[in-house]
Image (cartoon, rainbow, N blue to C red):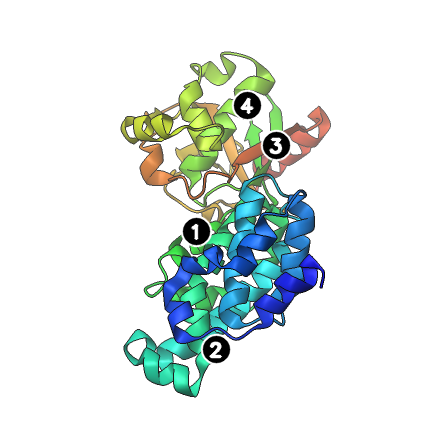
Amino acid sequence: MSQTMGIAGFVRGPSDLAECRAGLELIGRDEVQAFLQTITDPDAATAELAAALEDGDAFRAGMMAFVCGVLVERGGSVAVPVDAVLALAERGLHQARDFVAQGGANAEDELFRRSPDLVRVHCSLPFVLLAAMTMLSRDPRARQRLRARPHVPSLVDDLEDHYETLFYVREVLALLDDREILLLDPRNRRGFVLGLTGVQDRMYHFYALAQDALLQHTGPGYLGAEPVDPFAVRYAQNRGLTEEDRQAAKDLIDHQRIGFQYPGADGKPTLFFPGSASLDAVPVVNGVPTLFLDERSIHAQWSPTNMYPVLHEALESRVSLRELPAEDVEARLAAFATPAG
């Protein structure tokens, strides 16, 4: 029998309650160790495991999804197992809701006699969710696909008190991916479209990234801005942070360098747009969320670890910047200066 058939056959074999309760001890089983010790190509290994998830025993499949996550953490491509792991996670959430509704952990023994797969899923789901976080943190398109699934957000909300990793899953699914915001500068007649990927839905996170992108693009001193704090930017990007960095970030305070303002009807900036707000609260003009830029009028500061804590060490947050042609900027600004009526 080939090694592939060996691990697939093991995953299909039925787990008992003791095995489920033992959790990670499954990884030490001879069948699993024999498979792991022959791995020379992580992508080939995750492909073998992913193929076994759909038809496998509910507990063993979940634990093999966890192994997929470990292999991705060690350099394997997220593209190979991501769809199979997230499909397993979604099925698991549906079954976990049934598990909780039928008595949950307090009725585990009786449930295993009546509906063993509910208990198998319950025991493996924490590990499946860790694998899902590994995938979602690395793959913005996977986040978009999962958040578009109609029942996933409600399942996460219903079960968050029972599976602690769902807090992080919820936060990751709330990230701003493939979103754009228009920043217009009436003072200098300039405009910028910023694209968001992996940005937490609190505008302070956007401000920390946008200030850096604007100053890199325009050069020092734009709109009277002082230089950014490189460590604050690196924390906001979640780029190359060490454990020492994460500890130091607890005392970090970042602040506004540029004024991000509500657009005024007369084509002039008005009040500072609050950094604690959601992107959805930004005024939408001609279908695009739009703010005005100006010199800083107030000193807004914030704690990055409070406003946008690190959700996963592999999650990158970034903004792209595209400057609009002068004629496009003038047309957009003219729309604000035109009297209504």
Amino acid type, callout 1: Glu
Q: Decide which of 166, 29 is in the foreground and name it.
A: 29
Q: CA distance from mark 4 to mark 3?
A: 10 Å
Q: Residue at x 64, y 59 (%)?
A: 50
Eye-nearest disc, 3 or 1:
1
Give the spatial CA distance, label 3 vs label 1.
22 Å
- For mark 4, does the 10 Å Cα neighbourhood hold few (<14), some (14 to 19), or many (20 or more) residues? some
Q: Check whether the beta carbons of the residues at disc 4 and disc 1 lie within 8 A of each other.
A: no
Q: Position of residue 156 (x, y in %)?
A: 43, 64
Residue 29 visible here: yes
Report helix, strand or loop for mark 4.
helix
In the image, is residue 73 above or below residue 110?
above
Disc on the earlier residue, 3 or 1: 1
Q: In the rendered structure, which disc, 1 or 2, sits on the residue that comes first in sequence? A: 2
Q: Amino acid at mark 2?
A: Asp
Count of numbered tags: 4
Look at the image and tell me in which quarter the N terminus lies. Answer: bottom right
Taking the image as shown, residue 285 lies to the left or right of residue 128, namely right
Q: Earlier in the sequence, mark 4 or mark 2?
A: 2
- Which residue is denoted by mark 4 in the rendering? 214
CA gap, disc 3 and disc 2 = 45 Å
Look at 64% across and 35% down and name the residue there.
332
Dot placed on the residue nearer the N-terminal end, 4 or 1: 1
Is the residue under label 2 in contact with that under label 1 (CB below 8 Å)?
Answer: no
Counting residues from the start of the chain, the first of labels 3 and 2 encountered is 2
Q: Return the residue at label 2.
A: 117
Query: Please, is residue 18 above or below residue 256 in the view?
Result: below
Whether residues under marks 4 and 3 lie with C-beta atoms below 8 angstroms apart, the answer is no
Q: Earlier in the sequence, mark 4 or mark 3?
A: 4
